[in-house]
Amino acid sequence: MSEVEVRNEGHVRWIVFNRPERMNAITGTMLGELNDALKAADDDPLVRVVLLTGEGRAFCSGLDLKQAAAGEGIGGAGLASAGVRHLSTREICTVTLQRMDTPVIAIINGAAAGYGLDLALGCDMRLMSDKAVLMPGFAKMGVIPESGGTWYLPRLLGWAKACEIAMLGETLSAERSLGYGLINKAVPAENLKEEALRWANTIAGNAPLAIQEMKRLFRHGLTQDFESHSHHVLLSVLNLFKSQDFREGVQSFMEKRPPEFKGR
């Protein structure tokens, strides 16, 4: 059975961690399948939004502690065979996630810990079940946020709050996560999938070229000065003015009808 399942609903692609019996703890196989699924989604012009979630009662519990305690898997003696190819930046899932132009929303249906938390932080948006928790307990395990957390937390929350979350290592409820600004919305568990699809379909109904370009510019803007970034934006918008989607956006507005964007 695949450790990462992929399914489509219109222009929305679900990527689902599928080790529910182990709370979707990571393995070398899972990392490889996830990396391939993320790349495939970004390369598919029919996919306009990706929803990343977990099967069962967890989003992703991070390192498989049972394997690590036995000296196996990614956290044990099996590191060389289980995860070595993911040490290349070309194969690290969180790097692939950060490079993607397709919007990715984390649908946090249950516990997100360790690698799972870093993956959620690397998504563009986060919807969280009111019964889920974030578990930044790295310091309690003698490790660090190894897969993006040290980069994302200060940018999302500022230095002091990043230190508070990482160094205290306290489990965070959905309400507390929302208060910190770590998630976009806390959702009743029974409504999580419905709300996820509502967000995804709304985004998918907008002009995909513009959405992708927004994401690229947000990413580049993290390392550009304002003047350089403004020049980059101008070149981008001039290209978008030439697109069929722009003409459709204007025409549909004038005709007072919903637009039908083709991504061209």
Image: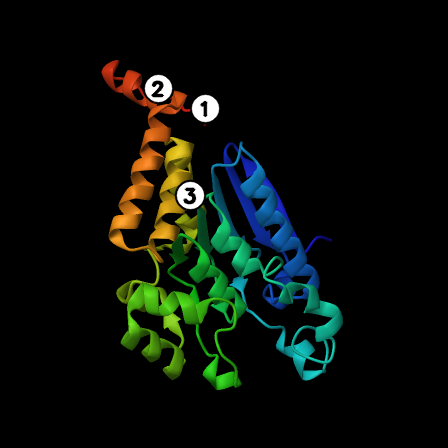
The residue pinned by badge 2 equals 248
Discs 3, 1 touching: Cβ within 8 Å = no
Distance (Cα) linking label 3 and label 1: 25 Å
Nearer the observer, 218 or 198: 218
Q: Is residue 50 above or below residue 260?
A: below
Residue drawn at (51%, 54%) of the image = 97
Q: Position of residue 240 (x, y in %)?
A: 36, 29
Discs 1, 2 touching: Cβ within 8 Å = yes
Residue 198 visible at all: no
Residue drawn at (73%, 73%) of the image = 80
Which of the 4 image quarters holds residue 153?
Answer: bottom left
Nearer the observer, 94 or 63: 94
| 3 or 2: mark nearer the eye | 2
The residue pinned by badge 3 equals 194
| Amino acid type indicated by mark 3 | Glu
The residue pinned by badge 1 equals 262
Does dot 3 land on a helix, a strand or a loop?
helix
Q: Position of residue 19 (x, y in %)?
A: 64, 61
Q: Earlier in the sequence, mark 3 or mark 2?
A: 3
| Amino acid type indicated by mark 2 | Glu
Mark 2 Cα-neighbour bin, 10 Å: few <14, some 14–19, many ≥20: some
Does dot 2 land on a helix, a strand or a loop?
helix
